[in-house]
Image (cartoon, coloured by chain):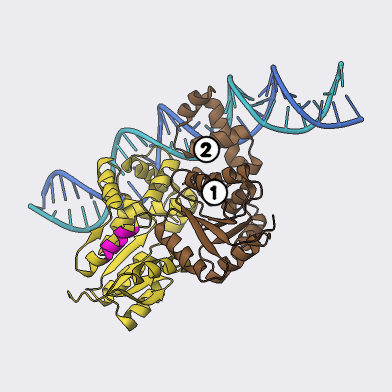
Chain colours: A brown, B yellow, C cyan, D blue
Amino acid sequence: MTAAAGTIMLVDDHAVVREGYRSMLQKQPGLRVVAEAADGAEAYRLFKEVRPDLVIMDLTMPGVGGIEGIRRIRQWDRSARILVFTMHENAGFAVQAIRAGARGYVTKSSPPETLLRAVKDVLAGAIAISPDIDHELALSRLSGEKAAADVLTAREFEVMQMLLAERTTDEIASALHLSPKTIANLHSLIKDKLDVASDIELVRLALRQGLLS
Amino acid sequence: MTAAAGTIMLVDDHAVVREGYRSMLQKQPGLRVVAEAADGAEAYRLFKEVRPDLVIMDLTMPGVGGIEGIRRIRQWDRSARILVFTMHENAGFAVQAIRAGARGYVTKSSPPETLLRAVKDVLAGAIAISPDIDHELALSRLSGEKAAADVLTAREFEVMQMLLAERTTDEIASALHLSPKTIANLHSLIKDKLDVASDIELVRLALRQGLLS
DNA sequence: CGTCACGTCGTGAAATTTTCCCGTGTCCCG
DNA sequence: CGGGACACGGGAAAATTTCACGACGTGACG
C-alpha cells in the first residue's frame, strides 16, 4: 500500500503535453514513465496491464473523460493513486475528481515544482491539492454560489442538463413523459434554487461548475 | 523574408506544455528554442528583443491573450511568422487568429508530426492549417451557422456582448442610455439573425465562436 | 400506525417578457 | 431626389414565467 516506487502512467490527449510531463519527470531520480494513454478507456485498460504506482490524469479528453477514467480505475483497484493535472481551475471539477477517487489535483498553470511536489506527495500516500484550487474551493464557499449537484433533486438536475443541451421545453416534456407545463415549472424552480435570474446566467454557472463542454 | 533559419519563441502559460514543445523541437536539426513567454504582453516584449524566426503561440492565456499578442507583434513587424498551437478546435478562434496575422493554426490534439510539419511550412513561408480545423471551417460553412461578428451590426453585437456578460435588460438600457424596450427588441432581433431559439443556444453559439471565456 | 416533511406532478390565473408589426429619424449611396 | 440599411422605440397580441394551490407517494420517526 505504501510501496512508493516510482512507476508512472501519463494520461492526456495532447501528445505535446505528455512529452512535457515525460521530459520533466525523467529528470527526477526514482521516477519512471512506464505507460501513456490518450483517454479514460485506454487508461483503464493499460492500468490493469502495467499497474503503475501513480497515474497522472487530464480531465477533458475526447471519448471517455478523466472523471470516468478515475472511477473505472478506482473501481478495479481501490488503492490506485491518481493525480489530476488539468487546465481547469474551477472548484467544480476538483470536487468531482476527488469524489471519483483522485488523490490530488494540480492545475497546469502551476509552476513545475508544484507538480513534482504533488507527484511525490501522492506517491507517499498523501493528498495533494494545489494552492490555487484550495483558494477556489474557499472562494466557492464564500461566494455562496450553489452547487447544482447539491441543491437540485435528481429530477431537477436531469431537466437542467437537458435544458443545457439545447432541447426545447416540449422536447424534454415528451422525452420524460411529463407535461410541458411541468418542465416550465421545473425550469423556473431550477433558476430559483440556483439563484440565477436568466438562462444566460444559468449556462455560465453550469460552465463554471464543469457541467458543460 | 524567406530567411528560414530556425530560432523559435514559445508562448504558452503552462510550463509543462512549453517543456513539451521544447523537448519535441530540440530533436529536430536546425531548430532552436531561444525564448519563452507566458502571455501576450511578455511575448511582444521578448519578440522585439530576440527577433525569433518563428513564434509558436497559444491562444488562451491569463492577461494579454494570444490574439492580442499576435496583433501587437504583427503591428511591430509585418513579416513576423506566427504559428498558433492551441487546444481550441473551433473555427471561430482560427478565423480570429488568422485575421490577426497568424500564418498557421494547429490544434494540440494533432499528432506531433503535424506540428513539426507546420513549423517547417511556416518557416518556409507557407500557410499551415491543420486538417481538423480545415474540416471545422468547412463544416461551419456547411452547417450554415451565422458568424455573429458578420451578420450583426455594431450595435447589435455590443448588446449581445452585454447580454452574454450577464447584465439584465434594464442595466444595459441605462448603460447605453436607451429604452429597455429597445434592448428587448434588439435581444429578440439578435436571436432572430443568428437563428437561435433560446438564450441557451445563444450562449453556446457564442462559446463555439470564441466570444466567451 | 399516523403524520410530517419532501419530492414530484399538475392546474389555473396573473404578471411579465417576447415577439411582431408599425412609425420615426438619420445617414449614405447611386 | 428616392431607395435602403440602421437605430430607436411604441402598441398589442402571444408566449412564457411566476406564483399559489392541491394531490399523490414515500420514507423517517415517535
Location of residue B125 by image quarter: bottom left
**Quadrant location of the N terminus of chain B in the rendered image:** bottom left
Which tag, 2 or 1, sits closer to the chain's start? 1
> Which residue is rendered at x = 38% and y = 64% of the image?
B58
Residue type of the residue flagged with mark 2: Gln
**Residue identified by numbered label 2:** A161
Tag 1: amino acid: Phe
What secondary structure is marked by label 2?
helix
Q: Where is residue B135 in the image (x, y as percent from the top left)?
A: 27, 47
Q: Mark 2 lies on which chain?
A: A
Which residue is identified by label 1?
A47
Give the residue drawn at x 33%, y 78%. B47
Does residue A87 sit above or below B182 in this rendering? below
Can the viewer see residue A195 in this picture? no
| Residue stretch rendered in magenta on the structure | B112-119
Q: Distance from label 2 to label 1 (Cα)? A: 32 Å
User: What chain letter is assigned to the residue under label 1?
Assistant: A
Residue nearer the viewer, D12 or A75: A75
Circle 1 SS class = helix
Q: Position of residue A76 (x, y in %)?
A: 61, 42
Who's the residue at 54% across and 26% down the image?
A181
User: Left or right: A194 with respect to A172?
Assistant: right
Q: Do the residues labelled 2 and 1 touch (CB within 8 Å)?
A: no
Vertical comparison of B43 with A132: above or below: below
Q: Does A1 appear above or below B18?
A: above
Nearest the camera: B38 or A24? A24
Picture quarter with the C terminus of chain B: bottom left
**Does residue B161 appear in the picture of this structure?**
yes
